[in-house]
Amino acid sequence: MNNFTMNAGIGDHSYVQNSSYQRGALDFAIPIIEEEILTKFNIKQLVKNGAVFIADFGCSTGHNSFPAMHIITQAINRIHESAEFLVFFNDLPTNDFTTLFNSLPPHRSYRAAGVPGDFHRRLLPESSLHFAYSSWSLHWLTQVPKAVADSSSPAWNRGAIHYNRNEVGDAYLDQYSKDVGAFLEFRAVEMVGGGLMVLLVPGVPQFLDPQTEYTIHSDVNNLLGSCLMDMAKMGRLSEEKIDTFNIPAYFTTPQQLKVILEKNNSFSIERLEILKNTGMYSRPSVDSRAASYRAVHESLFADHFGGEIIDELFALYKKKLAASPVFLNPDNDKTIMILAILKRIID
């Protein structure tokens, strides 16, 4: 995962230009986030002196982070007009922080600092953070589950690039549970008692009809995965190369996430809701859908298969998508957004 990053810069294939899908749920989360801040964020008790410390864990290049930081700081200002803010933007060291800092809103109400590092580890001083935020980040795993790449394991994911069988899915869920648990463990050390955490987590419903519905997971696994197999049949790459490639991400159900959150004794669950994601309508064409996946996954594919296959891979994907009425219709996209608002329990 250390070499993984969203596409950098502001060009046609960049994450900046192709991440409106990820932004979609924020509009529905705004009134809930504002309500929780107004009713449960006791700034006078939390901040004795100095600034309010806020962190966005998994900020990417900031395009979707900046609106969220504006909403949070404005809501806190409603209960404390003279509050000062310091926002920590965190992502992996390979993230394009240059684009982020070059794009900072000129009239923002906060000072900004970059914190490169894996958020599954300790990043900030003990009891220093008042508000934590993370959107479209917790589904990424620290690693592909070992059993999935082991040819002697029942969970070996031969011929697929993501989980599609129970044994493989179980291995992914186990890794996801460990990773989210680690994230919460280290945030508990960093956050002050009474601090709030807002998590926007992509997920899937408990039940799905694969004949008439899809999610991001099934779109990537079925369509993009089959494109790679077609390229193997054409001699462009080997099937063995595909067998050793798996996407390090897991899309949880609300029930699974609730169980994981409840295992941590440092946070109380204040809200856990499923939000509508209008982002599904932000990719109306075959080209825009392909561009959105390329902006997210290109570095993963290029690192494993080589950059020379990328154009051909996504050209094949566009052909398959255009020929699939189920996957082409955004109304059939049943990917969900889970909003979890947690409060750091006072020790």
Image (cartoon, rainbow, N blue to C red):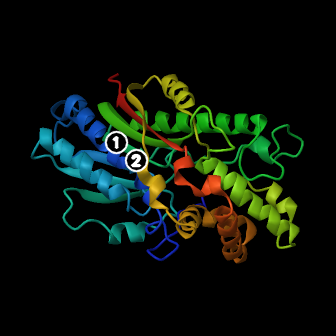
Residue drawn 49% across the image and 70% down it: 14
Marks 2 and 1, how far apart at CA: 6 Å
Kindly give the residue lying farthest to the left in the view shown. Answer: 82
Task: For the C terminus, give its image quadrant.
Answer: top left
Q: Residue furthest front?
A: 325
Place of residue 130 in the rendered image (x, y in percent of width and height, measured from the top left): 29, 39
Residue type, label 2: Ala
At 32% from the left and 35% from the top, the residue drawn is: 196
Q: Residue at x 34, y 72 (%)?
A: 102
Q: How many marks?
A: 2
Tell me the element at label 1: helix
Q: Which residue is mark 1?
A: 29
Badge 1 crowding class, 10 Å Cα cut-off, few under 14, some 14 to 19, many 20 or more, is: many
Residue 139: quadrant of the picture: top right
**Front-most of residues 111 and 309:** 309
Outermost residue on the right side: it is 152
Q: Relative to 182, say whether 303 is above or below.
A: below
Q: Nearer the viewer, residue 20 or 189?
A: 20
Image marks 2 and 1: residues in contact by CB distance under 8 Å: yes
Dot 2 alpha-carbon crowd within 10 angstroms: few under 14, some 14 to 19, many 20 or more: many
Q: Which residue is mark 2?
A: 25
Residue 134 vs 313, above or below: the answer is above
Q: Is residue 233 visible?
A: yes
Which structural element holds mark 2?
Answer: loop
Give residue 71's position: percent from left, percent from top: 25, 49
Q: Is residue 248 visible?
A: no
Which quadrant does the N terminus fall into?
bottom right
Residue 294 location in percent, x, y?
59, 66
Identify which amino acid the numbered label 1 is placed on: Ala
